[in-house]
Image (cartoon, rainbow, N blue to C red):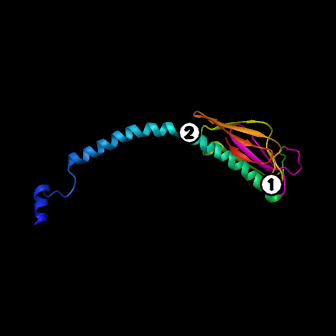
Amino acid sequence: MERRRVLQIDGSSKGFNLIELMTAIAVFGILAAIAIPNFLAFQPSMRLNGGAREVMSKLRWARAQAVEQNATYVVDFPNDHSIRVFKDDNLNGTWDSGETTQTFDIQTDYTGVTFTVSGSNPQFTGRGTASGATTITVSNTSGSRDVKVTAPGNVKIS
């Protein structure tokens, strides 16, 4: 009895009619028109944070390699978006042919992100300490973040 009453009130609809469907599409379109520009404006900030984390992780990886192999690893920056990590076999602080090296381009994953280095290139010893203090300023159109290497070998984003 109750079911019959519901059918009388509701009719016998078995889906959406065209007006309901067009209303839902219009609401979705309005929400997308508001959300997409905000998302696009947020992307440079996400790229900056990701780029800073990437630089920090490469520095920490170099330190871990130095400790693991009880050797000196140097991190240098051939240009404003590449990081080169190498095992400094002759301890001269510069890359020489024949020394084990890996180069990472930060703009592969984080377009528009560049960095500048103040201080000397970080050199990590087998004890995990660094040669001195270095600051890598990672920047793009949304601002900048500093990745700092301290003499005890700590690497952090500030």
Determine the secondary structure under disc 1.
helix
Which quadrant holds residue 50?
A: top right
- The quadrant holding residue 51 is top right
Residue 35: % across, % down: 41, 40
> Which quadrant holds residue 32?
top left
Image quadrant holding the N terminus, namely bottom left
Query: In the image, is 108 to the left or to the right of 16?
Result: right
* Towards the viewer: 70 or 108: 70
Answer whether residue 5 is magenta in the image: no
Compared with 48, 88 (above or below) is: below
Q: Which mark is residue 66?
A: 1
Which residue in the structure is indicated by mark 2? 45
- Neighbour class for label 2 at 10 Å: few (<14), some, many (≥20)? some
Q: The residue under label 1 is which amino acid type?
A: Ala
Callout 2: SS: helix
Counting residues from the start of the chain, the first of labels 2 and 1 encountered is 2
Marker count (numbered): 2
Residue shown at the point (81%, 38%) measured from the top left:
120
Q: Quadrant of the C terminus?
A: top right
Is residue 15 found left or right of 103 in the rendered image?
left
Magenta stretch: includes residue 83: yes
Q: Position of residue 111 (x, y in %)?
A: 59, 40
Query: Foreground: 61 or 129?
Result: 129
Magenta-tinted stretch: 70-93
